[in-house]
Image: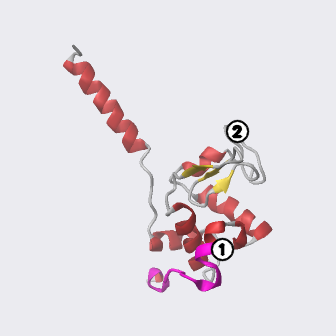
Amino acid sequence: MIHPLKLFSCILIALVTLDSTKAKLYQKCPLAKLLDSNQISRTLISNWICLIQAESGADSSKKTSLDNLSASYGIFQINSKEWCRVGRKGGKCNKDCEDFLTDDITDDIECAKQIYRDHGFSYWKGWTTKCKQNKRLPDISGCWN
């Protein structure tokens, strides 16, 4: 039989671990303000938010394994094949892919801006299918009050 104190300790550790890995789901207006403060043009912020919603559901901890043995990381689903490396800095953004899984998305934004400069929004399939030609761009007009 397990000692009650050991059982309590195990449960406590499990709860702390779950809480510390809890994903941050970004809401539209705080995300718009964060993008704006990271020098994303306000005229494009609706496109960025649509892209984020399409790619990750605005979940900063989303990781998607792909058939080509790469994975996409974070709120922008930045791919390990070209833009980052697993376990060390590297790729075109010179980042460890796992850095894109944290709630601080500042580095994610910088890498996404580089991807956008190189390829435009069309790099992201989620944007192409759900946002291109203003299909379903979110209204952020009330976010600046």
Q: In the image, 120: left or right of 140?
A: right
Position of 62 relative to 138 (above/below) = above
Q: Residue at x 67, y 66 (%)?
A: 124
Q: Amino acid at mark 2?
A: Arg
Tell me which colouring the rendered structure shows: secondary structure
Q: Amino acid at mark 1?
A: Thr
Q: In the image, 97: left or right of 145?
A: right
* Label 2 Cα neighbours within 10 Å, binned few <14 / some 14-19 / many ≥20: few
Q: Residue at x 50, y 63 (%)?
A: 58
Q: What span is colored magenta in the figure?
A: 129-143
Element type at mark 1:
helix
Residue that mark 1 sits on: 128
Q: Earlier in the sequence, mark 2 or mark 1?
A: 2
Residue 135 falls within the magenta-colored stretch: yes
Residue 93 image point, x, y percent: 74, 54
Q: Quadrant of residue 38?
A: bottom right
Residue that mark 2 sits on: 88
